[in-house]
Amino acid sequence: MKSIVATKPYAESLDRKSEKSRRTQQKLVEAGIDLFSTYGYNATTTRSVELHAKVQRNLISYHFGGKEAFWKACVSILFKRFNELLLPALSQAKDIEAGERIRFLIRQSVRASAAHPEVMRIMSDEGRCDDWRLEWIVERYTRKLFGTVRELLDDGHACGALPALTYLQFYYLLVSSGSMFAMAPEYRLLSGEDPCAEANVDAQADAIAHLLAPRPDGSDL
């Protein structure tokens, strides 16, 4: 009986520590995504992330092992969130007529970019440098996304819903449609509006769908 009584507070203490650790890791990841996507990997220090997250010094090393592993954790979580918005649309669109399916998926891609503009910001930064970070992202995330785009383009060509674009042309046109969300500060200065406001996101999604996959009767104008 004594051992049971003695271990109960200890177990509760472990639970509290575990929950505190999860909250700390979450704060660090959110701060990391924000700073890495805004200032880039080289300009972001672990200490700047800890200050941004309002946590104690050296907690990135304690929880993640160092800057490289922490960056990978942040990017993994970011792409997971992006894919959770985009990938379900592929199954949702299976029973839609081919041309409308293409337009639906284009719109969903734009909306995912609006929900997570940090993806475009990080790729704009990392895509310029031929180093380990770019290779890591491509092999784990963007190569699969590019494969999905290839399938989308093949389907679009087969049903006559897409213009004669190469895979890479279509891919970069679609990806670049998220630049207005990634460059939100400039957009706000130019327009006085929030690019991620629902009406602006819908307008961009419709515009890109029309540009890349216009309806033959022009009814989407």
Image (cartoon, rainbow, N blue to C red):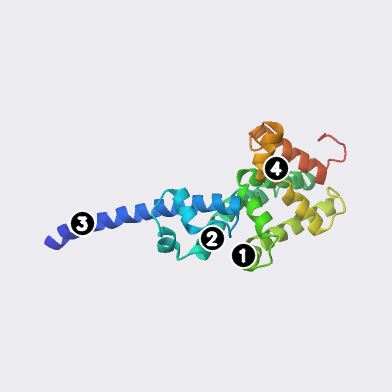
Labels 4 and 2: the sequence-earlier one: 2
Residue 17 position, x and y percent, is: 32, 55
Amino acid type of the residue that numbered disc 4 sits on in the rendered structure: Met
Task: Give the number of the disc on residue 123.
Answer: none
Circle nearer the N terminus (1, 4): 1
**Residue located beneath label 1 in the image:** 133
Give the secondary structure at mark 3: helix
Circle 3 packing at 10 Å, graded few (<14), some (14-19), many (20+), is few
* Residue 71 circle label: 2
Count neighbours of disc 4 (C-alpha within 10 A) and say few if under 14, some if 14 to 19, many if 20 or more. many
Q: Position of residue 9 (x, y in %)?
A: 21, 55
Q: Which residue is depicted at the point 75% across and 38% down?
A: 206
What's the CA distance linking mark 1 and mark 3? 45 Å
Under mark 2, the amino acid is Trp
Residue located beneath label 4 in the image: 180
Residues marked 2 and 1 touching at CB (< 8 Å): yes
Q: Nearer the viewer, residue 181 or 219?
A: 181
| Residue located at (61% from left, 44% from top) | 115
Q: Secondary structure at mark 2?
A: helix
> Which residue corresponds to the image point at 80% horizontal and 41% vertical from the top-left?
210
N-terminal label among 1 and 3: 3
The residue mark sitting in front, 3 or 4, is: 4
Would you name the residue on which mark 3 appears?
8
Side of 46 where 158 appears, left or right: right
